[in-house]
Image (cartoon, helix red, strand yellow):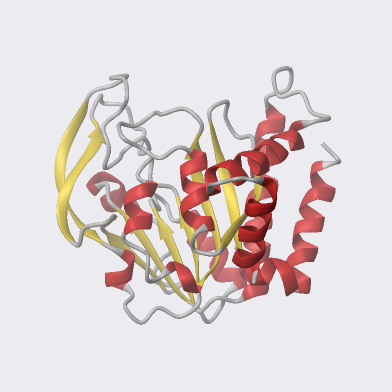
Amino acid sequence: MFMATLSRLRKKLGLVSYHEVLQLHDAQLLSWARGTNFWQDSSLRKKTNDALIDLFYGLVKETKPDLFIEAGAKTAFASLAIRKHLPDARIVAFEASPENFASYATSQPFKENQIDYRHCAVSDTTGTLTFNVRDDGVKNFGANSLLGRSSETYPVKQVTVPSTRLEDAFPDCPSNALWIDVEGASRHLIAGAKKLLPKTCAVMIEVEDRAAWEGQWLALDVSVALMKQGLVPIARDFELNSQHNLVFLRANLLRSHHRARRSIEHYHSRLSSF
């Protein structure tokens, strides 16, 4: 129903692509910055991120997926938080960096929270692949990716890590929700999840407006790919100047799920108080 309505809208407006429709929507999302001044008070950016995370947690709580997947998990804080909202769901967190996995597998309370924490990249390949790990001696467990940096801001080392497509890892996937933070490699993850995404209720994903990684999809490319799977971008934060997070909700839930819609209303109400 939603996709048919979108198709009619595109024809009525004389538009020819999802990119053009979503460019209009992206401009509307940007307008949510009104009433704030991120350049004088940088703490407001963090507040928008906190509000968006709470929105996503609320949507997951209300839609009650059977499976929660965190890709690019690091400490898997999202999985640990979601367990409080989904006491009976299966939760799987993927972390590709060997250093991250070694550090957090034993220091985080995964066993007692029944979280399956896996040393594995999520991509369009099941097997092994080359992964870029920051290698400048700084204890920064982020900024690791399947992709190379667009500019060499720090040295990296390349390691071979296990990899999986989500549709191979979960061939009989039930309803699910996704938290995606894969440092620019969203194209690869989405390509390997085509059979899983039609059953996805909600997604939170980190995106960029300016390329930080070689060959990466930018925010609009991600929105187009997920919209084609029936997922609607409903909210964003303003965490950094060229990097932010988007939340997507399945179209039929946006249309008819009363409590999910109330969660979105609450999010906007919260933004207005900043």
Q: Is residue 226 left or right of residue 195?
A: right
Could you tell me residue 62's position as x and y percent? 68, 72
Depth check, front residue: 25 or 143 = 25
Could you tell me residue 147's position as x and y percent? 27, 37
Q: Is residue 105 left or right of residue 229?
A: left
* Vertical relation: 30 (above or below) 69: above
Depth check, front residue: 240 or 29 = 29
- Looking at the rendered image, the quarter that the N terminus falls into is bottom right
Q: Is residue 105 visible?
A: no
Splitting the image into 4 quarters, where does residue 265 fall? bottom right
Q: Is residue 76 left or right of residue 263?
A: left
Could you tell me residue 184's position as x and y percent? 38, 40
Q: Is residue 261 visible?
A: yes
Which residue is at 27% across, 71% downward? 168
Splitting the image into 4 quarters, where does residue 253 fall? bottom right
Splitting the image into 4 quarters, where does residue 46 fall? top right
Total count of labels:
0
